[in-house]
Amino acid sequence: SSGKDENKSGSPSGPPASLSGTIKIAYLQKQGDQQYFVDEADGARAKAKELGVDLKVVNLGNDTNKAVSEVQAAMAQKYNGVVIVVPDPAVGPQVVDIATGGGAPLLASDDQICVGGADPTKCAKDKLVPRVGFSGPQMGTQVGQRAAEEFKKAGWTPADTAIIAAWKQDVTVCTDRVEAAHQAFKQATGADVKVLKVGTDNTPPDAQNKTAATMSGNRSVKHWIVWGCNDENVSGAVTALHNGGYGSNDVIGVGLGAYLACKDWGSGKPSGMKAALFINGHEVGGLAVQTMVDRLRNGKPFPAEAFATTKMVDPSNWQQSGLKCT
Amino acid sequence: MTKSPPLDLPGPALAVENIHKDFAGVHALRGITLDFPRGTVTALMGENGAGKSTLIRIINGDHRPGDGRVLVAGTPRELHSPADARRHGIRVIAQEPEIVPHVSVAENVYIGALPRKAGRVLDRSALYRRMRSDLERLGFAHAIAPEALGSQLSPAQRQLVEILRALTTEAAVLAFDEPTSSLSEHEVEALFDLIRRLRDQGLAIIYVSHRMQEIFRLADRIAVLRDGELAGVRDASQADEGEVVRLMVGRDLSTLFARGRSAGDRVVLDVRDLTTEHVSNVCLEVHEGEVVALAGLVGAGRSELAAALVGDLPIRSGEVRVEGRPLRLRIPRDAVRAGIGYAPEERKAQALFMTGSVRHNISVAVLDRLRRFRFVSSRRERRLAHEFVDRLEVRTPSIDHEVRKLSGGNQQKVVLARWLARRPKILILDEPTRGIDIGAKAEIYRLVDELAGAGVAILVISSELPEVLGLADRIVVMQNGRITGELDRADADEEGILALAMAYDLAEPTQGNPS
Amino acid sequence: MTTTTNAPPPMPATTSGAHARALPRRVATAVGAQNTSLIGALIVVVGTFAWLDDGYLTTANMTVIGDTVAVTGLLAVVQTVVIICGALDISVGSQAGIASVVSAMAFTSTDGNAALGILAAIGVGIAAGVVNGVVIVYGRVNPVIATLATLAAYKGVAQLLAGGRAQGYVLGDDFFIFVARGKILGLSVQIWTLFVVAVAVHILLKYTDIGRNIYAIGGNDTAARLAGININKYLVAVYALAGVVAAIAGVILTARTGSGQPTSGSEGLELKAITAAALGGCALKGGKGGIGGTLLAVFLLGALENGLNVVGVNSFWQNVAQGALLVVAVVIQQRRNGERAVGLPT
Amino acid sequence: MTTTTNAPPPMPATTSGAHARALPRRVATAVGAQNTSLIGALIVVVGTFAWLDDGYLTTANMTVIGDTVAVTGLLAVVQTVVIICGALDISVGSQAGIASVVSAMAFTSTDGNAALGILAAIGVGIAAGVVNGVVIVYGRVNPVIATLATLAAYKGVAQLLAGGRAQGYVLGDDFFIFVARGKILGLSVQIWTLFVVAVAVHILLKYTDIGRNIYAIGGNDTAARLAGININKYLVAVYALAGVVAAIAGVILTARTGSGQPTSGSEGLELKAITAAALGGCALKGGKGGIGGTLLAVFLLGALENGLNVVGVNSFWQNVAQGALLVVAVVIQQRRNGERAVGLPT
Ligand SMILES: Nc1ncnc2c1ncn2[C@@H]1O[C@H](COP(=O)(O)OP(=O)(O)OP(=O)(O)O)[C@@H](O)[C@H]1O
Ligand SMILES: Nc1ncnc2c1ncn2[C@@H]1O[C@H](COP(=O)(O)OP(=O)(O)OP(=O)(O)O)[C@@H](O)[C@H]1O
Ligand SMILES: [Mg+2]
Ligand SMILES: [Mg+2]
């Protein structure tokens, strides 16, 4: 066969059908060994147990090819529904086609995907796959706004301040986040602060090493603002700045995830990690499973977008937010 | 084969003019001028390290001469690679056979010129057909199976492969670099017949060997190298052994075999009923100060017995005692600890650290005696290395020279030095003089005698009958994994040994005749 | 025991006897041993998962396994050739990444010409392979270092070409859809591609003098050189072949994921390819190995990974299980060989 | 030249003459060649970046480079020993990961006892190393396959122990703070650790019989065995040493990041370690190499990576630059050797 004829039937959010019997759901996650996604998987499992459905969680790493394979496998094994965090949004259309071909409803988690095109930001609203999670740009915006607040509060001038933006530069959703943060920061402060882009592999040691080098190239900078793709980047970069002699009053780090930031705060010592956006992976996982089960069992259509709560936390309030520090 | 020069042209098939070759720190050749006429076997002789292999490598295009030129059929040629040399009708049988381990013997032999059909498809049936007919034609059909893998070959068979490579292609010049060092009498005869036949067809043959008898049986001319220079060229019919030796070593060699000892009564090595995979029920005693030679044909099981005695092959039953104490042999370390030294058959593969220095190669088995709190004393190590380099006259620019760059004979001396340095009670030498020049041989024989005189029990495995006869106090002959007899020095001769080596064991019918 | 008979010398009998003894063992060793063990392991794995889950041993799931291993399989096949030469190509994943990006970009910039996209990818693959070969042979850089370096360099080039983002969108094109989802005689196009390449390489290795020369080079390069084989030409050509096959893998990646991926989907493939080749019986020092063993190893690893996901094993346990099973499979295989436990195994 | 004299053999004279002549060259060859090239490359890299950016050649930045390479350096040092044996340990990164998690967990569960945390990590490192060694020597699994397998397995174990999350927080403890930020005589504790381990291993390799036996095993294992070295014991011990040093690296990781990291920070370290060892002059087939070369290579790679970040090169270009420079460094080095360009370089 040419392969073309198999993707005629309904769109992923097509006519709801209700199922009885055991429901099998596949939850396919990128970067399944990162803390946020580990939490998300736990939340999903807990919810699946509560609802009495079969849940399989698969780690896709950063591998788009594996994403395709695993959706195919889920279809071959007659899974009733697929929730996916794609390693790259460009693989979205293929995933949609395969899920559609297999007749399983598809729900995007965390990252957006588009039905007929590689780039969700250029996607018509009705072509976006229903999604549960957080909006990357939105998260970035919150981070940028908080950084702006702290910047104004500290009373630094743009001339002696620089921003470190640390992220894995070939991960599109990371790029989206840091760019949104910069937009929001500019808008909120109106100031033009120099941004130093630091390419990392999204781990603390690498962020630390790369930031330390960047710092050496910019010794004239007196104050630093740090954001990044995740807590690993921000935490690593803040550590590097502290090791390089910048005190906690000269650094504004705004984390994303809060699971490493909380460790600094828990020690009670002053830290450049001023705040972090707590995104509750556990909650997202549970919500995604709930949404899928509602659809499969009760025929309830997917909402276009469902968001879990995010909360900007800092040393003063993180303990009340439900954030668990390991 | 592409156009070989026609054989009926006048003048020598090959000539070298004023050839020089330097290796870092070593003048291997200094102005060699020599020609190799058609229809002639020219023997190339000289001590270890005299430059024989280097000259042959230059002829083969494997080394570039530092100065001078090579003339093929009167025309100067730049030989950039062995492929070039081949194109000009030169084929070389290298001193160390280079075998491809995981392909068949047939492929090993025709490597580089495999028969093809329809484009580049290998013609496997033609390959084996050709292999079989060539083996038949050359008289080696019984000695090697075309389908066997390179990794399964014995040293003798490896050498045969190397020889066959050259003989199965057309050539005008054939150079043999010590082709017989691991062949038995039977193959040597077949090879000599062949060489004579090729000579009579008009080929120029270059033949390197340290075996004096062979040279006088085969060669028409004898060219002797010494220290990279041509010491002289003689007509074989007019020269005698003494003269050749004088040319080689620059002095008279009074006696080859020294003898200043007498064996003691104490049994040092006592082997009782030893059985391994290919060796059955061997009983053997070696006394203090005694030299026992193990004789036999290729594959008789002598090397395997030696490997078992040093704990490198599992012993199925039987016992080994050293000075009356039974030995528990799990790994060679146990044997070394018990005072057994072992120079194995294949020095390159089994004994030498080729990229290591002479010093490290000598000291490796005695580090535990050169150390203080696990720190090896460099001073003592160097002293030891110098001592043995001098004592064995190892021809090396320094004790820090890489062993890989020494000539074959000097490499063997390094192996011996390693074990002499350990001062063993028992020394097992498997083919200790393979590829060693006559001067060095005499040196090694003298050493063996000296060691025995100092009370060491020595077991020598050798395929060279003159060596066995000259060296041993007692000769034990093996065949097919069993001891078939024992001869005292007094009543041993070549015939007696051969008879035992070929003794046909009627009690145990063999596995049928060759096809 | 000093009597002498005038019987014929025993040499011939011994030799041919040893030969007769060795032959069946040799056949078993050469053709079978390795592959038999792998087939055994494959049966155990498939059997276990089929027993654990009904969904495993279905045509649909077998197709999924096939499609999943296609890309790794291609790289493992060509890695086998490189390893037989005694070398290693660690950059295959990055080459596939460049090829993926180039195929999508060429496709897009030629307004949807799939053939040009593929040709461009293959051209880039050849170039990358030749650069590897030349750096190694004429630059005298150890193959491991050289291809570790180009692993980084080619990855950077792919990222630069793509600006770090997935490029183009090819699933509007019939040809790419055909590659991604088409079937011929019930088997997917991807699996056909793997089989065609594998069979071609197998024939090259086993039935042409080129292949035999490759074994000779890996087995003993001095012997090959002295026999007049132009080993430099062979080595560069083998790296070029690796580039071509990596490019084909890259095109399949593009078709599967729908766009040109600079790194995602191709990172880490080098280790998978080397693992499969080594598990399939290639000696890393060269001269030994074959496509059959490598393919079996590819399918074994694919069946294992798929099965672990089918029965829903957590990804952390999967790591432990995959590592442990890999060790167990080889240990059993080696125990059967009865090799003595001395020094490093080959 | 046909007259015969009864003069003594000319040998001794030749020997000592050649000896005197060769000495300076020998020193240059043995000690220098490889290392001289690396020092040259290091000077070029440092010079270039110092010229491009004032911030590069400062004490502060040199400290940064030192700290950055400490973990990789430790693994490269011990990888050097493994490679000299003729083997490879691909699992070092995962071993560091387990050790990192275990140190943090043991620290936390003993209510902040740093010594116990470290001891636990080292214990786990020894165990992991011994398992590697035993699987390889007695299980007869090829070192590459075996440690690829344990790379996965140990990573899984670390993830399982940690539940996939960073564990504990150690930067409340003076000792860990000392490791992370402390200085002795102006040099950071991390660099001191690297130097102490490197010097110890260097002494082990060059001045003890143990080290000499390790070179012997890698040079020719049959010869080593026949010379009376218990090669099995040595191999297992070397893998255990690799485990111990990987554990030390894991503890440093914990101190640097403040918590036990199961995978983050230790993935990919194996390739970096092998790259450094190979660039530093280790022959992957064993028997050759040294700590000096490896350390120089570690610093060269670290200085390069740091410099590219100091001058703000985009991470994609960094990949290209690192790959290209690695190749250039080795090519220049080899050109100077004047080796003939035939076949695979070693
Ligand atoms: N590749 C090399 N590098 C350095 N020196 C070498 C090299 N090859 C040979 N030599 C040196 O050149 C000299 C001649 O060696 P060659 O191998 O030609 O001797 P030979 O006459 O064949 O000795 P043998 O009888 O022991 O085989 C020796 O001193 C040897 O150490
Ligand atoms: N690896 C092996 N596999 C099969 N047979 C072997 C192996 N090694 C040795 N043999 C056999 O064991 C017997 C004894 O061989 P061994 O090498 O000990 O003989 P040898 O008397 O030392 O002869 P040589 O002069 O060839 O060294 C031979 O029949 C040989 O074929
Ligand atoms: Mg020679
Ligand atoms: Mg023998």
Image (tube, coloured by chain):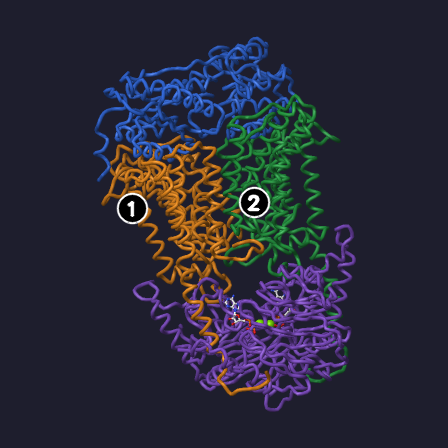
Chain colours: A blue, B purple, C orange, D green
**Would you say residue D299 is visible in this rendering?**
no
Chain for mark 2?
D
- The quarter of the picture where residue C216 lies is bottom left
- The quarter of the picture where residue C70 lies is top left
Indicate the amino acid at tag 2. Asn
Which image quarter holds the C terminus of chain D? bottom right
Q: Which residue is mark 2?
A: D132
Question: Separation of disc 2 and disc 1 at Cα?
Answer: 38 Å
Q: Is residue B237 above or below residue C284?
A: below
- Given residues D231 and B115, the one toward you in this image is D231
Return the mark for residue B85.
none
x and y, in percent, of residue B98 in the image: 51, 67
Q: Is residue C41 above or below residue A266?
A: below
x and y, in percent, of residue C257 in the image: 34, 34
- Given residues B331 and A151, the one toward you in this image is B331
Q: Secondary structure at mark 2?
A: helix
- Looking at the image, do the residues carrying marks 2 and 1 touch, with CB atoms under 8 Å apart? no
Q: Secondary structure at mark 1?
A: helix
Q: Is residue B202 above or below residue D186?
A: below
Which image quarter holds the N terminus of chain D? bottom right
Indicate the amino acid at tag 1. Trp
Farthest bottom residue in view: B238
Chain for mark 1?
C
Ligand 3, image quadrant it occupies: bottom right
